[in-house]
Image (tube, rainbow, N blue to C red):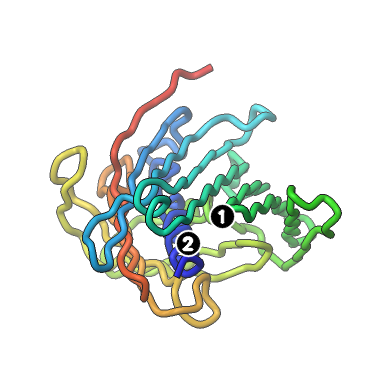
Amino acid sequence: MKKEFLSSFLLFVWVLILASIASAQQPQTKSYVLGEVLTYEGKFSKIIKGIAVADLTFKVENAPNGKDYLIKSEAKSKGTLVKLVRFSFLQQIQSTVDSIKLHVLKSVKHDAQNDRIRDSEAVFDYDNKKVTYTETDPTDPMRAPRKVASEVGANAQDLVSGVYSLRSLPLAVGKTFEVTVSDSGLVYKVPVHVTARVRQKSIFGKIWCFRLEPEVFGEKRLIEQKGSLIIWITDDARRIPIRGQVNANIGRVEIKLKSISYTPKR
């Protein structure tokens, strides 16, 4: 149950990140808001409704090279999940994104699940159309790194940057877009359907949102089991995801936006 919960929850988290780290790439908006910090809370429902299980934060910064973007994302377990199930996790992803082409250049991940820890890095080489993924165990330096290499096109994304290709297109009910996403060295085509435009409660009050349904569950997809993922994104220039929901065999995970803030520019 723990492994199934984590894979479903974290995938949901990172698909949510796809929509959360930037303003819409519409002509009237900026692609990124430097210093923007979005905070979410995740709740799990099976027998008992709405148990808080995780906190999520996402922040956009300048990359160390001064020209590209760096997105720092974190998902951390808390509360009932840790106390009752005795299961904790911490997953951090830092994605470097090309500020002109808006494709991912490098992904660095730290993944801790109880005592199991893995560090990884994915490097995207667009000249040679290849992504190279390297995973290590920091608790066992003698263990050989796990390496995976796959072919990518000219506009590959990771789980953080993937929605940027989506943001370059106008959202409208009935449209379907496809995002190429690389995770752990493998490459997936993810169809994303815009299925409705509805009003949702949020920290901004009731607001019109697009309902997006990415196909991440199923055979040969990111999660090879039955389930569904839904994300509600504001229908305005900000394009902020205010709510998400994943339905799987283990139950339902709800994630809602709790706060938005901006750190001073350096």
Q: Quadrant of the C terminus?
A: top right
Q: Which residue is mark 1?
A: 113
Residue at image location 75% in from the left, 65% down from the top: 148
The label nearer to you, 2 versus 1, is 1
Q: Name the image quarter holding the N terminus.
A: bottom left
Establish if 39 lies above or below 16: above
Contact, CB < 8 Å: mark 2 with mark 1?
A: yes
Q: Residue at x 72, y 67 (%)?
A: 151
Q: Does 163 appear above or below 33?
A: below
Left or right: where does residue 200 sit relative to residue 212? left
* x and y percentages locating residue 121 in the rendered image: 70, 51
Whole-number angstrom distance, CA of label 2 to CA of label 1: 9 Å
| Residue at image point 62% right, 68% down | 187
Location of residue 44 by image quarter? bottom left
Label 1: few (<14), some (14–19) or many (≥20) C-alpha neighbours in 10 Å: some
Is residue 151 or residue 248 the one in the foreground?
248
What amino acid is found at the position of numbered circle 1 in the picture? Answer: Gln
Residue at 28% over, 54% down: 51
Q: In the picture provided, is 32 more to the left or to the right than 170?
A: right
Q: Which residue is mark 2?
A: 6
Dividing the picture into quadrants, the one containing residue 155 is bottom right
Give left or right: position of 146 versus 164. right
Using residue 137 as the reference point, say whether residue 96 is left or right of it: left
Residue 216 vertical position relative to residue 262 in the rendered view, above or below: below
Give the residue type that dot 2 points to: Leu
Q: Measured from the top left, where is residue 141 in percent x and y?
A: 82, 50
Closest to the observer: 89 or 257? 89
Measured as percent of width and height from the top left, residue 129 is found at: 74, 62
